[in-house]
Amino acid sequence: MPNTTGNKKSTLCFYTETIEVSRLSAHAFFEAGDECYKGKRFYWQNKEKTFTIVGLGHAHILSNDLDDTRYSDIASKWRELCQTSLKEKVDVSPILFGGFSFDPLNKIKSEWDTFPSSFFAVSSFQLVIKNEQAFVSIHYITDEKDSSGAFEQLRNERDALIHTAQVKELKVHAKPKLIGRKDRLKDEYLKAVEDVTNQIRNNEVNKVVIGRSLMLTFDESFSSSTAIYNTAMEQPESYLFGLEKDDKMFFGATPERLVKVENGNVHSAGLAGSVRRGKNSVEDKELGDNLLADRKNLGEHQFVVDMIRTVFNQYCENVKVPSRPKLMKIRDIQHLFTPIEGKLKGDASLFEFVEALHPTPALGGEPRLEAVSIIRESEQMNRGYYAAPIGWINTEGDGEFAVGIRSALLDNEHAYLYAGGGLVAESTSLDEFEETRVKFRPMLRTLGGNMNE
Ligand SMILES: C=C(O[C@H]1C=CC=C(C(=O)O)[C@@H]1O)C(=O)O
Ligand SMILES: [Mg+2]
């Protein structure tokens, strides 16, 4: 029998059933959902590649278009769903996956119009791969009195999905041909960088992250499966994520953790300050060593570390912050990196950390509210879910959110790419433009664009 509950307070019942399966590729499982669950899937893999989740179908959606209360709204709906609907302890915890927009006050019409300010879902079929074991769960959330027929149907669908994923050969993930590439609002971006740097020099704010966007056009629709597959191939050392909504998918390979909560231990990281990789190991080391000593980049980095430390000091004890950043070297770029950890001292939830931390000065600026309002005014675009929290939480309240950078929104035969950089007093528009070019590279390579413009 599936685990089930009913409760007087809630009319909803949450039915789950988990089986362990041998040999199941996450990509193949995602792709098995191409026919029936397109537009309702997600993909997540942590940086260490020790935890992969794929969700197909929507058993239940939690979303809102709220501003200030959007985090607590999702948190309380999730708590209620877990507490009143899911009473029995289950072997593999159901996972709520989704994300928040960067700035709910940005109302500029854009490619993001169908994405609410918060969008989360419990999937109908959930694959979890952990410690080399794979589990597939069915989730069914309903107010029907008798669900046995519907649940039996889901079992049949689950078996069919697993069968397809195990026996069908993965399609050849040939990319559609790139036929167009457009820098969007390039002049506005360059002007914004100049203007905002002047505001910083005038001590109006300390730091602001300004971004820009590219639009790619393909000769045919770019499928989500192809995009996810190629992202995994290109960026093995980052978090991989994909969140489908209707006919679009926000996806990427981000190196940046926002926050992870596990058994009362909380982890975050300051990641800001960048330089390209060298052409050979000697140049690479030189670039890295210079980055570690560079005033402008150390300045960018320090605002982030200070802000995360302040949040951790409020909610955690035993806060550990290394006194100096180290280098994080990934395929196209090297960053200044400071891991930060602590032990939860009260009962703050993962969503409270997300609210307190988003956006850090690695994506917003310092002071936070001023920076976000400058971004809204001067970028003249809508970041949507770019640079915003994306991740998951389980029924125990453990989970992880990454920052949705090095990312793109896939929209049939178009892809919108985003990249930005932290401005401080020493910034120049030429260098910042160049930095965004380096940050676009992984997504361009993934999608088949020309990296050299
Ligand atoms: C805003 C982005 O990167 C942030 C993360 C790392 C380094 C950054 C920088 O050096 O400017 C940015 O703060 C982006 O990739 O779009
Ligand atoms: Mg930078």
Image: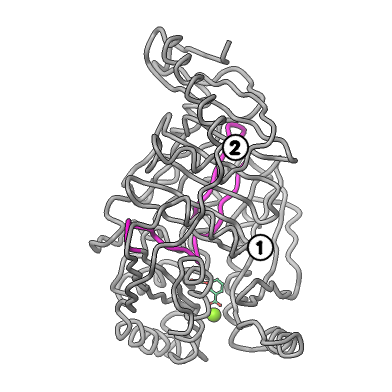
Q: Nearer the viewer, residue 384 or 181?
A: 181
Res. 73 image quadrant: top left
Would you say residue 123 sits in the magenta stretch? no
Pinpoint residue 373: horizontal percent, then vertical percent: 35, 69
Amino acid type shown at disc 2:
Gly
Q: Nearer the viewer, residue 96 or 53?
A: 53
Q: Look at label 1 and name its amino acid.
A: Glu
Gap between marks 1 and 2, in whole Å? 26 Å
Residue beneath the point at 45% across and 92% down = 430
Residue carrying label 2? 397
Q: Is residue 4 left or right of residue 205?
A: right
Along the horizontal axis of the image, is 370 left or right of 135? left
Main secondary structure found in the magenta portion: strand
Residues in magenta?
389-414
Indicate which quadrant contains ligand 2.
bottom right
Q: Percent x, y for residue 183?
A: 34, 79
Classify mark 1 as within 8 Å of ligand 1 or not, answering yes or no. Answer: no
**Quarter of the image with the C terminus in it:** bottom left
Rendered view: 326 above or below 312 = below
- Callout 2: 10 Å neighbours few (<14), some, many (20+)? many
Q: How many marks?
A: 2
